[in-house]
Amino acid sequence: MKLDILAIAAHPDDAELSCSGTIASHVAKGYKVGILDLTEGEMGTRGTPAIRMEESATAAEILGLSVRENLGFEDVFFTEEKKYQVAIARILRKYRPEIVLANAVEDRHPDHGKGGSLVTKACFLSGLRRLETELDGVLQQPWRPKAVYHYIQNNYIEPDLVVDISAYWDIKKESILAFKSQFFDPESKEPESFISRPGFLDFIEARAREMGHKISVTYGEGFTVERVPGVEDLMVLV
Ligand SMILES: [Zn+2]
C-alpha cells in the first residue's frame, strides 16, 4: 500500500498531540495517511505498553488511518545510529509516503528532538540506491519523501507553516483522549505526570488557537520545514 503522508512519532500519542488535526484533515480529503510509532512509550510515568497499544489502535480508528505500525525501539535509549535509521528506511520504502511528518526539532523530552533528527536522516538514507533492504525476502526499491515537516509539541517553536485544522479540532481532541492512561482522570491512582495534570488539554487548545491565530482561523497546527516549500498555485496558500 502506498501512503500520501506518514507521521512518525517517538512515542504513541506524540502525533495525536501535535499533528492529528492535520492528519484528520488530509484523511477527509481522501489522502492515505499512516502513523509509525518508534517506541511503545514504556518509560512513560503512567499506563503500560499493552494499554498504550490499545489506546493507539483506538486513536488510529478515530483518525481514519490507513495503517499504524510500531518499531518497538527502546524508549529513551534509542539513538540515531545505523540500525535505527535502516529500520525506519525499511518502513519508508514499504509505504512510499510523499510527505513525512516528524517530531519537533527540539523539545522538553529529549526523544522528540532525537526522533525528529533520526527521521530526517532515515528519509535521506532511504533514497540511497546502495542501501539494500528487504521486506519479506524481497529487495526494496529506494524511496525518498518529497518533504519532511517537523510538528511542534511541548516547547514553543515559531512555525514556518500552519495547517488550518478548525474543522478537525473535535477529532483531534477525541484522538488525544483515546490515550486515557496518559491524561487527567480523577479516578486514576497512578502518579501525576507532566501531561496528566488537569489543564494540560487547555494548553493543547491554547496552542492550537495560537497557531490558528497566525493564519486568521480558529485552530491550527504549526510545522517547521527543512527546505523552502514551493507551490504552483498561490491560491492554495491561505
Ligand atoms: Zn513523546
Image: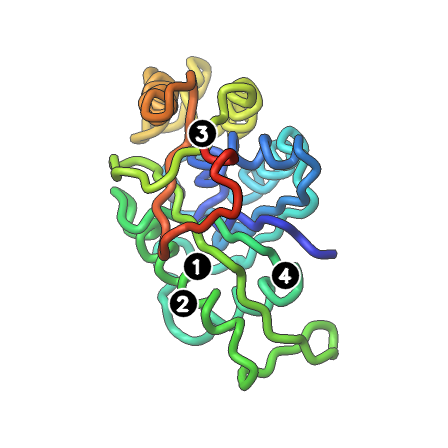
Tell me how far mark 1 sits from mark 3, CA to CA.
40 Å
Task: Count neighbours of disc 3 (C-alpha within 10 A) and say few if under 14, some if 14 to 19, many if 20 or more.
Answer: few
The mark that comes first in sequence, 1 or 4, is 1
Using the image, tell me which numbered label, if any, was put on residue 96: 4
Whether label 3 lies within 8 Å of ligand 1 gets the answer no
Element on which disc 4 rests: loop
Residues 19 and 192: in front is 19
Using the image, tell me which numbered label, if any, was put on residue 238: 3
Amino acid tagged 3? Val
The mark that comes first in sequence, 3 or 4, is 4
Tell me how far mark 2 sits from mark 1, CA to CA.
18 Å
Residue topped by disc 1? 74
| Colour setting | rainbow
Q: Determine if residue 197 is in view.
A: no
Amino acid tagged 4? Arg
Q: Residue at x 60, y 74 (%)?
A: 142
Tag 4 and tag 2, C-beta contact below 8 Å: no
- In the displayed structure, 206 sits above or below 72; it is above
Tell me how far mark 4 sits from mark 2, CA to CA.
16 Å
Whole-percent x, y for residue 223 in the image: 38, 41
The image shows a total of numbered marks equal to 4
